[in-house]
Amino acid sequence: MQFIDYYYYEYQTAPSPFASFLSLLLGVAGIVACWLLFKKAGKPGWASIVPFYNVYTIFEITWGSGWRFLMLLIPIYNIVLGIQTCIKLAKAFGKSGGFAVGLIFLPSVFTMILGFDSSVYLGVPGKGGYQQSAPNQDYAPRQDYAPRQDTGFRPTFCPSCGAKLENDGSKFCQNCGRPL
C-alpha cells in the first residue's frame, strides 16, 4: 500500500497575499474607471457600483434605452447583443473599430482605457446629440450618425488639450488642431 502525505499540499490552494492584493487593486481600478466612464456620459457615478443598474446604465449610454439589457436573458442573442453594445460603446466615445474589438475581447482593460483617457462622450448613435469626432471611422455606415447641428455654443477651452481658444471663429484648436 502506498502512503501519500498531503501535509505539504495543504496550503497550495490558498491564493498568495500578492495575488489577493493585485486582484483587489484591479477591482478598485475597474470600479473607478466605470465611475469615470459614467460621469463622462452624464450619468451618476454611483450607478457603476449598483448591480444590474450599472448594466442598465451602460445600455442607456449605448442604445438610448436601458431596458434593452433585459434582452441579455435570451440565450445566444445575448452574445450578439454584447458584441453590438461594445461596438456602440466605442462609437459613443468616438473610438475606432479596433478599439471596439478590444472592448469585445478585453473588456476590463479597454473599459479602464475609456474611463481614464481624455475621450469625450458624443452621444447615442442615431440620436440628436451624436457627432462623429474622427472621419476615418468607417466600420459603421454613415447613416447611423445624426447630422451635426450648429448650436451656437463655442467652448472657451479646447476639450482635448485645455488650451484657451480665441474667439475668431476658427473651427480647429490652434494648439492641438482638434476640430471644435
Image (cartoon, helix red, strand yellow):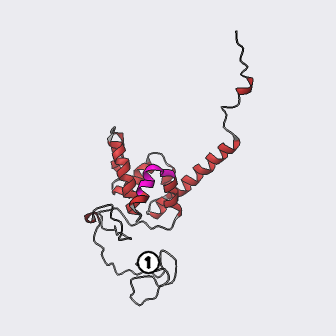
Residue at point 45%, 80% (across, down): 177
- Examine the rendering and report whether any part of residue 70 can be seen: no
Magenta region, residue range:
100-108
Q: Name the residue furthest front.
A: 2
Q: Is residue 176 above or below residue 7?
A: below
Residue at point 28%, 68% (across, down): 146
Q: Mark 1 is on which residue type?
A: Arg
Identify the element where label 1 is drawn.
loop
Q: How many marks?
A: 1
Give left or right: position of 122 versus 149. right
Q: Is residue 146 above or below residue 179?
A: above
Residue at point 43%, 89% (across, down): 167
Is 102 covered by the magenta stretch? yes
User: Residue 150 at what x, y percent from top left?
Assistant: 31, 78
Q: State the image quarter where residue 12 is shown.
A: top right
Taking depth in this image into account, of 84 and 136 the one nearest to the observer is 136
- Examine the rendering and report whether any part of residue 145 can be seen: yes
**Pointer 1 local density, CA inside 10 Å: few below 14, some 14–19, many at least 20:** some
Q: Is residue 141 above or below residue 71?
A: below
User: Residue 171 at what x, y percent from top left?
Assistant: 38, 83
User: Residue 91 at what x, y percent from top left?
Assistant: 38, 62
Residue at point 48%, 45% (across, down): 51
